[in-house]
Amino acid sequence: MAAPCHARRLQASPAFCSPAASGQRSAAALPRRQLARQALCSWQRQRAVAAAAAPRDFDKDRFEAANKDYAKLTQQIEDTAVEVVEGLQGTSLFLVGMMGSGKSTVGKLVSKALGYCFFDTDTLIESVTNKKVREIFAEDGEDNFREIETQVLAELSPFKNCVIATGGGVPTRAENWGHMQGGITVWLNGQPTLLAHRVVGDGTESRPLLSQSGEQSDAEQQQADAYTAAVARLTALLDERRPLYQDADITVSLEGSGPDADIGAPAMEVAYRVLAAINQRIKDDAEERKRRMEFEIVREDLPASMTVIESPAAAAQAAKEAEDPFLP
């Protein structure tokens, strides 16, 4: 049977394993610090919109103070990335997590720091089908979307030196884990309230699973109502998917503190957490391998019921050596 047209189109793409193939040509060409600034600006916009979504006192001075360590954090990312690149030796990274967890934004920062290619599976799906994700859900159904998603992962799985931001539902299919087993899976873990602030700030129109909740957004709908509906839907989805996400190799928290409490830590901070967690995992694995190689059999620790019997050949050799110490 011939492969579906979107699969053939994906396989035939000559520039598939390149930043441009994921629709990120402009991001790949940006200097690392400029890309980080863009992520910071995006976080600031989310912060302001999220404040409106859940009315409360918003301290602008505290918000601005949270950005003072920007240059220091950028340097920490670069320094940690040097160690991680050496330890990874080309191993690809797969970012998993709920919608609103920042997989694409964080993935771009991590890929830039490591010198890796970046891919977003949703962007690739839209490219090969010439449809938006929401259109695929509406016209073809979620099952068809998941099938295409699995095919995209299958195409990406052999490649090294890649950071891949996956769709929120990727872990729900067992075969997808098989496609990701050659890399390191990182779960960006955030609470539903945090994720709701983010998706409401970005707009729920492009989130088909949120629109299915029955709370369709329109220009007149209060953002507070949209936030409440998003929390309910995200809570249900996360309860269903949490056991699957927990199978990831590494878990990174999105939680923030102070003025970041509602929408979580900025993308730059999360990117640093990802790199630091991977670096620590590499070191821990190296220590574990070293520990397993350093062992000795201590006879005193043998169970009392066991008797150690010396080899007859070894006993004969020892007797000969005792008679003539000059034997070779």
Image (cartoon, helix red, strand yellow):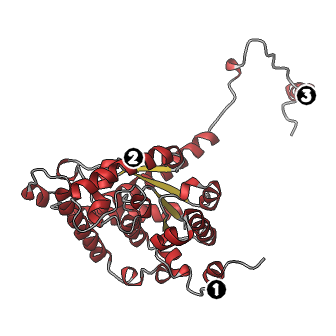
Q: Earlier in the sequence, mark 2 or mark 1?
A: 1
**Residue 12, numbered label:** 1
Q: Earlier in the sequence, mark 3 or mark 2?
A: 2
Q: Is residue 300 visible?
A: yes
Q: Residue at x 34, y 66 (%)?
A: 78
Whether pointer 2 and pointer 1 mark residues with C-beta atoms closer than 8 Å, the reply is no
**Residue 265 seen in this snapshot:** no
Residue 281 percent across, percent down from the top left: 48, 50
Left or right side of 222 for 104: right
Residue occupied by mark 2: 235
Q: Position of residue 208 (x, y in %)?
A: 43, 64
Mark 1 lies on a secondary structure that is helix
- N-terminal-most mark, 3 or 1: 1
- According to the picture, the residue beneath numbered tag 3 turns out to be 320
**Residue in view at x 85 percent, y 25 percent:** 322
Indicate which label's residue lies in the foreground, 2 or 1.
Answer: 2
Measured from the top left, where is residue 305 in percent x and y?
A: 78, 12
- Image mark for residue 21: none
* Residue kind at label 1, given as amino acid type: Ala
Towards the viewer: 305 or 209: 209
Of 214 and 105, which appears nearest the observer? 214
Q: Nearer the viewer, mark 3 or mark 2?
A: 2
Q: Work out whether residue 206 or residue 220 is closer to the camera in this orientation and state it.
A: 220
Q: How many marks?
A: 3
